[in-house]
Image: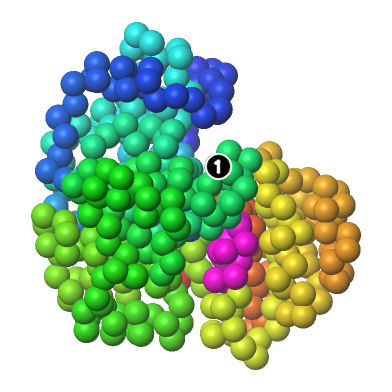
Amino acid sequence: MPDKLSKWIEENLLNFNYKRKSLDRYKKVLSSLNLKYPEEIILIGGTNGKGSLSELVTELARQSNLSVGTFTSPHLLNFNERIKIDGEEISDEIFLKFLKKIKNLKDSDDLNFYQIISLAALYYFNKLNLNLWVLEIGMGGRLDPMNSLEPDISVITKVALDHQEFLGDTIEDIAAEKAEIARSEKPLIVGSKKVPNAILDKASKINSILISQRNNKKSNFLKNLLKHFSQSKAISEEVLFCLYQISKRSKFKFSNELILKVSENTKLHGRLSLIGNTLIDSAHNEDSIKNLIDYIHLNFKNKKLNLFFSCSEQKDPHKLLKPFEGLIDKIFLGGNIHDRLMPLDKVLLKTSDLNFSFIKMDSIQEIYNSVKISKPNEINLIIGSFYFSGEFFKFLLNDKGLPLSISSLNELY
């Protein structure tokens, strides 16, 4: 973000707390905007895969000549990535304009940081008379700002353990939070093969149209699509199932040919992004680590792995790294990279009983230098957090003399 935008956010928004709040006041402010809603709203939640699915659905719409607004989180390079029109991130000038509009509204002081950002996105989308809004749930579902809207299609890609400090300690607790995005008489698409009871109960109670792998007969096309990607696991089965079901239940009726084209050609940056011999993945919970390891087994069976790791303060590095025992001997720990990442010494303290040799690296420069001198038959893994992936991407773009934008990342592959 340019200095003008970042300075305004720092002075006007960063003092707003990040704690989850009731949506009552938010809905009041939202109502005051008198938004005109698009032809269709798709609300996408889930523990893993929701960002990938949001990007894929956006691309389906874009290639069908539909106008689409996409709201996602977190971001890799710039905060602007969270708000996109037809796949292009919002400009700094427009972003600042709409942030100021929301900040000046009555009752906005009672909102949290994410609620203000989301209102700016919705107000901007409203001004453009778009065909479709693709809205990603940041965490949970019940108290997410986007759950204040009335989606035409609700999606839960997968439920796994993550953010337990906010959502609960069990799969059922977390599923109950996520199930709150369901709507009466509207499709609720669930990617998981095993649907948690909390979702089944919610769908039954409000009479949602539940679509899951358990209760939906797969078409030949979907079977072939899942089989095609099972060879590499580049896109998860849950995401592909949801993408297909969205395409068939959307009023825009995306074709099978387009689904295949978009699935094969869309770059999901920070998610299994292979650049040269470096694999950048933002896996940050136990389920996503398991999927990453499955991907490695399928695609890099005889390669030596160099693991570079850094995770957010709220994560448990022990649980994230333990699955790599037996696969690698040493782990390069990144420090002084981002203020939201766990300090080196704390990571070491929490992982002291794991069977690895740990090597401290005190900057992204040091990590990047190690990656550059690695041998062609080695695979460098950059994992643990979107913050870590983002900082590595930034350094890579700077080194190549490319602008810090998502579109620039396409030039790296």
Q: If the image is split into quadrants, where does the C terminus sit?
A: bottom left
Amino acid on which disc 1 is placed? Leu
* Percent x, y of residue 152: 20, 46
Q: Magenta stretch: residue 285 in it? A: yes
* Percent x, y of residue 304: 70, 83
Which residue is pictured at 57% across the width and 19% down the height?
15
- Nearer-the-camera pick, 368 or 311: 311
Residue 58 in which image quadrant: bottom left
Residue 129 in which image quadrant: top left
- Above or below: residue 370 compared with residue 384: below
- Nearer-the-camera pick, 33 or 148: 148
Which residue is pictured at 41% across the width and 62% down the height?
195
- Above or below: residue 161 compared with residue 152: below
| Residue 33 appears in view | yes
Image: magenta residue range: 278-292
Residue at mark 1: 167
* Percent x, y of residue 391: 60, 51
Position of 48 with respect to 388 (left or right) is left
| Residue 402 appears in view | no
